[in-house]
Image: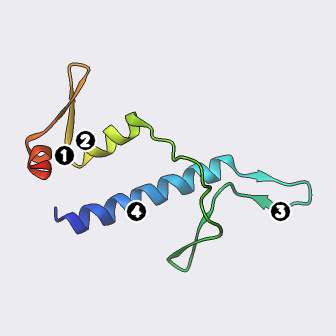
Amino acid sequence: MKLRDVARRLTYDLVARSQRIALAKARRRADGTLWLPTRLHERGGLLYRTSQEGRGDVGLRLDQLGTVLATCGVLQYHDQHWSVTRSGRALVD
């Protein structure tokens, strides 16, 4: 796949995942409105944000990062160890 296509697909997957998580955490307020814990919204096929991210450090979840990189062919998990693939080494060199 071309890098542009990988980026497009990864972005689509991450946005879809964030929407599923937000919907799972959604709550109905006492006044009957719906509270969605998200800053990213979709309307008419376009994404927009409603607020800035906080100034705190971004949490890095190594397991999820490893899974994303393995999906892209950069890492592989074998015998309970992560290693860089030949394609991953080519990206770094």
Residue 81, compared with residue 27, is above or below; it is above
CB contact under 8 Å: marks 4 and 1:
no
| Amino acid residing under circle 4 | Tyr
Residue 67 place in picture, x, y as percent: 32, 39
Residue 49 place in picture, x, y as percent: 59, 70
The crowd level at tag 3 (other Cα within 10 Å; few <14, some 14-19, many 20+) is few
The crowd level at tag 2 (other Cα within 10 Å; few <14, some 14-19, many 20+) is some
Q: Earlier in the sequence, mark 3 or mark 1?
A: 3
Q: Nearer the viewer, mark 2 or mark 3?
A: 2
Residue drawn at x 20%, y 64% as measured from the top left: 3
Q: Which residue is mark 2?
A: 70
Q: Which mark is residue 12?
A: 4
Residue drawn at x 25%, y 41% as measured from the top left: 70
The crowd level at tag 4 (other Cα within 10 Å; few <14, some 14-19, many 20+) is few
Q: Nearer the viewer, mark 2 or mark 4?
A: 2
| Amino acid residing under circle 2 | Ala
Task: Look at the numbered disc 1 and give the secondary structure of its residue.
Answer: loop
| Amino acid residing under circle 1 | Gly
Q: Nearer the viewer, residue 33 or 57?
A: 57
Q: Earlier in the sequence, mark 2 or mark 3?
A: 3
CB contact under 8 Å: marks 1 and 2:
yes
Cα–Cα span, label 2 and label 3: 40 Å
Cα–Cα span, label 4 and label 3: 28 Å
Q: Earlier in the sequence, mark 4 or mark 3?
A: 4
Task: Look at the numbered disc 3 and give the secondary structure of its residue.
Answer: loop
Q: Quadrant of residue 78?
A: top left
Q: Which residue is mark 1?
A: 73
